[in-house]
Amino acid sequence: MSAGPPKIRIRGLVKSFGEKKVLDGIDLDIMQGTSLVVIGGSGSGKSVLVKCILNLLTPDAGTIEIDGENVLALPPRARRAVYAKVGMLFQNGALFDSLPVWENVAFGLLARHRVTRGEARLRAGEILAQVGLGPEVSRLFPAELSGGMQKRVALARAIAARPEMLFFDEPTTGLDPILGAVIDGLIVDCVKRLGSTALAITHDMSSAQHIGDEAAMLFEGRIVWRGPATSLLASGNPVVDQFTHGRREGPIKMELCGGM
């Protein structure tokens, strides 16, 4: 783990929707240049946690510090400057159907007026090569790509601006095990190449062990375990063990519909 203060520091994070408290006092540190994977069941609050960190949802209480600054207290312009350092790989890719691949990849660069269109197209080709896609893909549209290729393009877009922080939302969802392993490997390579700090949420235990330096389990609104990602299948924590091994019996109680 890196020395020095955490890149991302979360304290006492609370978020409710009506009477449902989804996050109940989350404390979490992510050190510079490390990758943390957060696991948890459906509805456990993983996506809500990420959306709070990314300023897509406003928490009810708590602090979120990035580089030592509480982003929740920053004025809008300063907050935008912080989030310009972030790259995001969405669960379903979230590519723009009406734009060719190269423009999808360079979208953030063009939106912030960092490059000309000609420069953006060249940059997109370089980034696509880093995720194993040839120049012929640049002119295609998302609908012409396979699911695995769409994930690669989405990853290329996430890293195009060389972000200091990368967020991954279920990066291998919908992929077969081989393609999932390929995407995991690309994520690891990209994070290491950029020296980025990364946070991923996933249900895929193979993916979690591959891309994470550390892992944390979210249960009933709190982090109930944290440790090396390689220890996920032998954590010694009953909640983590039930989840990672897919056991029906244990502290995690699932509500079944239809009286079954």
Image: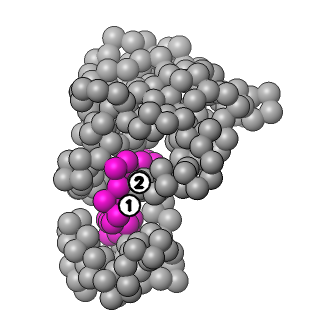
The three-letter amino acid code for the residue at tag 2 is Lys
Q: Which mark is residue 158?
A: 1
The one of 141 and 198 positioned closer to us in this rendering:
198
Q: Which mark is residue 85?
A: 2
Q: Element under label 1?
A: helix
The three-letter amino acid code for the residue at tag 1 is Ala
Q: Residues within 10 Å of mark 2 (few under 14, many from 20)?
A: some
Q: Is residue 213 above or below residue 240?
A: below
Q: Which residues are magenta?
A: 148-174
- Residue 230 pos. (x, y %): 24, 27
Q: Is residue 197 above or below residue 162?
A: above
Q: Quadrant of residue 138?
A: bottom left
Q: Element under label 2?
A: loop
Q: Residues within 10 Å of mark 1 (few under 14, many from 20)?
A: many
Residue 130 appears in view: yes
Residue 88 appears in view: no
The one of 117 and 237 positioned closer to us in this rendering:
117
- Residue 119 pos. (x, y %): 31, 83
Q: Which mark is residue 63?
A: none
Q: Is residue 248 left or right of residue 206?
A: right
Q: Quadrant of residue 100?
A: bottom left
Q: Write the residue at 23% across / 83% down.
A: 135
Q: Write the residue at 20% across / 66% down.
A: 130
Q: Write the residue at 66% across / 35% down.
A: 59
Which callout, 2 or 1, points to the residue nearer the camera? 2
Q: Is residue 117 left or right of residue 40?
A: left
Whether the magenta-drawn stretch holds residue 172 is answered as yes
Whether the magenta-drawn stretch holds residue 61 is answered as no
Q: Write the residue at 19% across / 53% down.
A: 193
Mark 2 and mark 1 lie on one chain; the one further toward the N terminus is 2
- Residue 248 pos. (x, y %): 49, 22
